[in-house]
Image (tube, coloured by chain):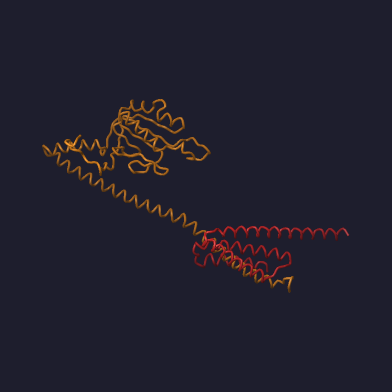
Amino acid sequence: MAGTPSKKNWLLPFTVVCVVLGGLLGIQVHSQQLRGATAIGRQTGLLVERLSRNELQLTQQREEIERLRSKLAEYEEEAASERGLARLMSEELQASRFAMGTVAVKGPGVELEIADSTMRIGGEPGASDVFVIHDYDLLQIANELWAAGAEAISLNGQRLRTGSAIACSARLIEVNNVTIASPFVFKAIGDKDKIVSALNIRDGVLDGLRVLQFPVKLTPKDEIVIPPATVAPVYEYAQPMEKEEKG
Amino acid sequence: MIVVPFVALVFGFLVVYYVLPPVPSRWADYVAIAIVAGLDAFVGAARNWLEHRFDEAIFLSGFFINMALAALLAFFGDKLGVDLYLAVVVALGIRIFNNLGRTRALLVSAKVEARRARTATASE
């Protein structure tokens, strides 16, 4: 028996071993599939759920804002129809609201569209930080627009008002706490020619972007509509000062 | 006869895959290492068979005990925070590879010898 195995000797152990090995393979394949499915699936599911919940909240809040606004408009109309002080106050309110940027405005101006560069290094899009638009590029443009006398500016539908920040958030950009991404569209109301020449100034901000093959589209327009800021600036710490306190 | 183990393999796989509930995913590493140990025993058995040293007791005990030991070692590694898992994988991997090489050499040399014997008898 020893040394020369007979058929009976190997068949049974092999069968037993094969059942066990097959079972283990089954366990492993199963759990690997589940692991892959859950690791990605769970996360995506979670994110999708969170996103849709946030979006729902957002639309609800927008509706709320709209409702309150129309109510306010009603009150104002009522006040304006009266005479004297109430009317004066209403006018004053309109003016300050206009200055605050919570009213949609229209007028002549320019539209500027920029996007991430078409130039690639290493073949991968976005492989280098040099070829994407950064928060400071947008800040510089916004600053240039203000400097050229723009009276109202929006960036991707977000009105730039007092206290609007353009900030970097991971690989995206936030303006008014709303996340935006390339392509970026500035709309500015003001003196068209002045703004165009200010932006196109030699070695200016657009010049630098064009050199690196960022697509830049600057179009003067006769009528531009700029949406209102959805939220007015909130003053938590600053308080208006009385004249007597000066000094 | 040779198909019986294959059928058993497929049977084991299907039963576990479709019938039994999935095991907790934290076991996955230990199951993986047990599979590697099982493969090692398998390849070792193939080599022993060709060397006429096959013994079912050694095979069976080697299969189950090595499997358990490998998983246990990986488990202790996890508890101690040392990657003993890797040590097991490397050791078993080398052994599997060695045994496979040896098996191949034995098979080829057996074939070569058979051919030589045939040509020798033909030329006589």
The quadrant holding residue B41 is bottom right
Please provide percent x and percent y for residue B30: 55, 63
Q: Colour of chain A?
A: orange
Q: Is residue B115 visible?
A: yes
Could you tell me which residue is drawn at 39 percent across and 38 percent down?
A135
- On the image, the x and y values in percent for residue A25 come to 57, 63
Kindly identify the residue that appears in the image at 42 percent across and 55 percent down.
A45
Which one is in front, A67 or B86? B86
Q: Is residue A114 left or right of residue A232?
A: right
Q: Is residue A205 above or below residue A29?
A: above
Query: Up-down: is B102 above or below A4?
Result: above
The shade of chain B is red
Left or right, A162 with reference to A210: left
In the image, farthest residue toward the left:
A84
Residue at the far bottom: name it: A1
The image shows a total of numbered marks equal to: 0
- Residue B108 quadrant: bottom right
Relative image position of residue A174 (x, y in whole percent): 36, 42
Q: Quadrant of the C terminus of chain A?
A: top left
Does residue A91 appear in this view? no
Quadrant of image for the N terminus of chain A: bottom right
Q: Where is residue A123 drawn, in percent x and y?
A: 52, 39
| Residue at the extreme right of the image, as rendered | B124
Is residue A13 shown above or below B110? below
Left or right: residue A80 compared with residue A182 = left
Q: Nearer the viewer, residue A67 or A97?
A: A97
Compare residues B89 and A105 and report the one nearer the observer: B89
What's the residue at 45%, 55% (across, down)? Answer: A41
> Left of B21 or right of it: where is A82?
left
